[in-house]
Amino acid sequence: MNASLNKLPHTQSHRLSHTLSKLCLSVIATGLLSLSLTAQAMTDLQGKPVELLEYVGKGKWTIFEIWASDCPYCPDAILYMRDFKHRYPQADLYGISLDGDNGYTRGRQAAQRFIQKHRVNFPTLMSDTVELDKFLLDQGEEALIGTPALMIYNPKGELVGVESGAIIAQDVIDFIQNKQSN
């Protein structure tokens, strides 16, 4: 304990200790509140909350392309997934923009500009890194390494693949066909 605190009468020392405890709790509570405010639920681009697992397990393969508007490799990934959608229409394909890291309004605007510029032709959801990492960890996976990335669900709704990088359409098709034959 600090030597100057030892010189205070017991009641003053107790009050100071109590005040410091309250201050520490206040700082911790503020930190937790700010964490909960930055972590937002996944939404569609209109701001409606969505549950990712509602999109999977409907008897079709489901692919999620995870991207961010400031990612230099994401335009290539979008191009590859547009090709995948054309070549493998029997799978459901969705995007997940991580532009929610920039706050909902700014993030949504950045995502919409990216979608228009790169002609994203599949539905896109919006999240942030904290939420997506929490989701992946809940699914038994590791946290996201970076963007772009893919999540692949089988027709039963089981997460069977997570891969970072701009993955070409043929590699995704080969992965699905390999899983179907096993």
Image (spheres, rainbow, N blue to C red):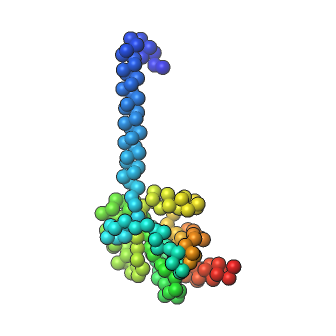
Asked whether 170 or 56 is in front, the reply is 56
Left or right of 90, for residue 33? left
- Residue 51: image x %, image y %? 43, 67
Taking the image as drawn, is residue 27 in sight?
Answer: yes
- Work out which quarter of the rendered image holds the C terminus and state it: bottom right
- Residue 136: image x %, image y %? 53, 61
Residue at 41 percent across and 64 percent down: it is: 42
Left or right of 163, for residue 70? left
Taking the image as drawn, is residue 110 in sight?
Answer: no
Quarter assignment of residue 105: bottom left
Count every numbered label the image shows and give the total. 0
Residue at 38 percent across and 54 percent down: it is: 38
- Residue 2: image x %, image y %? 46, 19
Quarter assignment of residue 124: bottom left
Asked whether 108 or 75 is in front, the reply is 108
In the image as oriented, which residue stretches furthest toward the right? 182
Residue at 40 percent across and 19 percent down: it is: 14
Residue at 49 percent across and 66 percent down: it is: 147
25 over 16 or under it: above or below: below
Quarter assignment of residue 115: bottom left
- Residue 95: image x %, image y %? 44, 73
